[in-house]
Amino acid sequence: MATHCESCPLHKSTLFTDVSPEDRRITQRFKSGELMVDPGTPVMMEGTNAPQLYTALRGMGLRYTTLPNGERQVINFVFPGDFIGLQAGVMGEMSHSVEATTAMTLCVFDRSDFFKFFKSNPSRGYDITWLAAVEEHFLGSSLATVGQRSAIEAVAWALLKLFQRGEQLALVRQAKMPLPFRQQDLADALGLSLVHTNKTLAKLRDRQLAAWSNGVLQVNDPEMLAEVALTEFEPLPKRPFI
């Protein structure tokens, strides 16, 4: 049974802004169904113009782009509530790929209805614009991290951001949250080698700030981790979702 927008479990999360009953009904009309995918399944492929857009309802994934020599750059990590395929919806073609890391449930929207939805529902259109602006801001922070932070600062920054997302999605229990990615994924996101990433994670573990193993991230002192990451420890802003 597909999840009805009025009873969507994401509404319970403190990460997201409240959605009015009318906007929920509008989104329900835009939604065309749900898709369940297995771990490792490509959701969208770089260079394609997929006919659907998605919201991650459950599960996690990766956004990444691949260079002609086969090297991969992870752009960011997909969490529940993330909107997938906006680029294709606006530009007609994806410049990056999206792949499921865990089993995922995706809310499906027809790209052919995208501009009508945007035009007819200003409040929901603003939400999509806000999401695009947040992605741009995050990519700017990521670029600063890759270019200017040291390895330990970069890894601390990434773990802190992932932990904060998990915390506001109610994934954290006793300072631990599921993080089902590989160290190679983190290395590819930060422009580090796998060996360097492993050694840097060991340093954070030895300082009892954070530990990540067997798909579980534990952050003992987020404020101290933020200090190491050269960033402020502050709550993530509430965000809309489609």
Image (tube, rainbow, N blue to C red):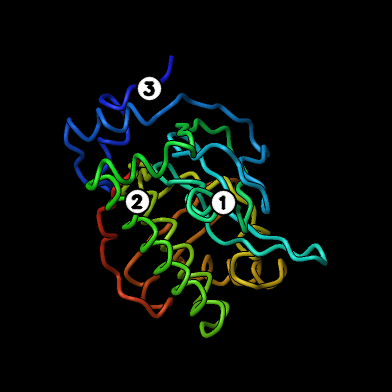
Residue designated by label 1: 92
**Residue 78 pos. (x, y %):** 50, 49
Residue at mark 3 to residue at mark 2: CA–CA distance: 21 Å
| Contact, mark 3 vs mark 1 (Cβ under 8 Å) | no
Residue at mark 2 to residue at mark 1: CA–CA distance: 16 Å
Q: Nearer the viewer, mark 3 or mark 2?
A: 2
For badge 3, the amino acid type reads Thr
Residue designated by label 2: 128
Towards the viewer: 129 or 81:
129
Image quadrant where one finds the N terminus: top left
Q: Is residue 94 above or below residue 233?
A: above
Q: Left or right of 172: which side holds 75?
A: right
Q: Nearer the viewer, mark 2 or mark 1?
A: 1
Q: Is residue 217 above or below residue 12?
A: below
Other-residue count near label 2 (Cα within 10 Å), few / some / many at <14 / 14–19 / ≥20: some
Q: Nearer the viewer, mark 3 or mark 1?
A: 1
Element on which disc 1 rests: loop
